[in-house]
Amino acid sequence: MPAFKTETHLVIILGMVFSSLTFLYAYLPIVLAVCFLCPKKYRNGWILLASLFFYAWGEPIYILVMIASITVNWLFGNVISAADDKKAKTALILCLVFNLALLGFFKYWDFLAQNLHAIGLNFIRPLKLGLPIGISFYTFQTMSYPIDLYRGRTVRQKSLISFGAYVSMFPQLIAGPIVRYTDIAEQLDHRSVTRSGFAYGIDRFMVGLAKKVLLANQIGMVFEQISGLPAVQQTVLTAWLGILAFAFQIYFDFSGYSDMAIGLGKMMGFDFPENFNYPYTAVSLTDFWRRWHMTLSYWFRDYVYIPLGGNRRGLPRQILNIMIVWILTGFWHGASWNFVLWGLFYGILLIIEKVFLLKHLEKLPRWCAHLYTCVAVLLAWVLFAFPDMREGLHFFRLLFGGGHAFADRTTLFFLRDNLLILIACFIGSTPLAKNLWARHEKQLRPLMPVLVIAALVICTAFIVDASYNPFLYFRF
């Protein structure tokens, strides 16, 4: 059991308890306290129960879907580990069919029905079922277990409870990072929490919470306001400001959640993989996707791209493999044609980079390559942000003139009123603050408890006062 001997940690934990103005603040200290107090052999069981309760708080019915996913994948894992190669392969295929059918039924059934209806085929009807929160994330996590088991990269998890704790673990259950079984297989049964590790977890959690509450939510309202403007008030510069606001919103929203998940995992003794590495500093789209949602990129690389042949079968096959991966990546994000087009957009540009553009970008000044990347990413976010293709097309037209003025008083109003949050987002999307902290860490470290508590108080105040508080990736 870790020793919490510093007054700093006690103050922070007590602060979270007594500031329990939301379910989140009340729940986390209880989960952590019981996790530390109970014997090690019962901790995975407690994590499983706490995680299922956490999920059921928002999805009481769909908790059965998660339990079914946990049980079926664990049982198939037992078969794969004990059978000969032929039977193990059959079991793996059946397991993957189950997982993909589960994901397809809840996420894509209505999409398929509506598109068939549009071409006159009415043999299936939309069911209008709600989408289980985080199903795309935990389905990919569970699939990694039988695949790696079949490949011999891990060993069977004997305990259904421990496997269930892995799948349902509440810190990263709903929006990632996507944690493969091999990432924490050893930690499930052999982990420890040190005082320094717990302190780092608190720091990382608060960084993520601040990203979400103080940056993502605030800049997100700018995009909501701009995208909702009447046509007569929309200008070119306002549209570019709007999509820039969305780019910052989705980055700080998603990376903030990932930071919170990594921090909470660290408090419980788990080392979750990093999910972001300052993607808006990238100098190519290839570089961007090595930095953005890294666990998803690596998942598709290892479980789709490489098994398809990767780059080992010549350039034409490599191009086909890239397109397959990016169509699937787009479709993974949502049952809507805008996500498919978003995936195609990236697939085509990444192929162009692979064939000839990347070598030319490497010869350009860094700012030129960075500018190209930023513009391409912003254009891609238009496809992502508007499920209604007509709205997306209209916004594209705005970005490139579309008969509207370049700027007006409304534009100046948005720039003036949101200048500080824009500057904060620009700085926060670069490693500038991290590098400054690293350079002066010895002098600044004593201030960290004060900064953490101040961030907790400010974030709590914003959460209580705010009516706009979505997590964008919950819908995936």
Image (spheres, rainbow, N blue to C red):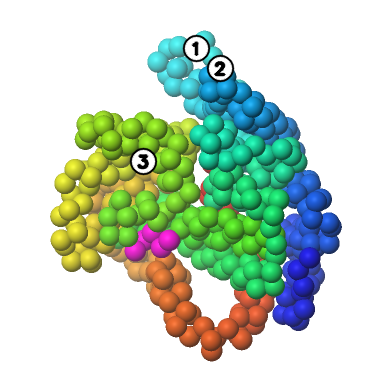
Residue placed at 50% from the left, 20% from the top?
Answer: 113
Pick the front one: 250 or 221: 250
Magenta region's main secondary structure?
Answer: helix
Compared across the picture, whether 24 is left or right of 312 comes to right
In the drawing, what numbered circle is on residue 255? none
Q: Could you say where residue 377 lies in the image, as x and y percent from the top left?
A: 33, 52
Q: Could you say where residue 181 lies in the image, as x and y percent from the top left?
A: 59, 44
Quarter-of-image position of residue 68: top right
Residue 159 appears in the rendering: yes
Residue placed at 24% from the left, 57% from the top?
Answer: 372
Q: Could you say where residue 169 lies in the image, as x and y percent from the top left?
A: 67, 48
Callout 1 environment at 10 Å: few (<14), some (14 to 19), or many (20+)? Answer: few
Residue placed at 30% from the left, 64% from the top?
Answer: 408
The residue that mark 2 highlights is: 125
First in sequence, mark 3 or 1: give its number: 1
Q: Look at the numbered disc 3 and give the secondary structure of its residue.
A: helix
Q: Look at the numbered disc 1 and give the secondary structure of its residue.
A: loop
Where does the N terminus fall, quadrant-wise? bottom right
First in sequence, mark 2 or 3: give its number: 2
Q: Is residue 425 above or below residue 132?
A: below
The residue that mark 1 highlights is: 122
Pick the front one: 461 or 327: 327
Q: Look at the numbered disc 2 and give the secondary structure of its residue.
A: loop
The residue that mark 3 highlights is: 342
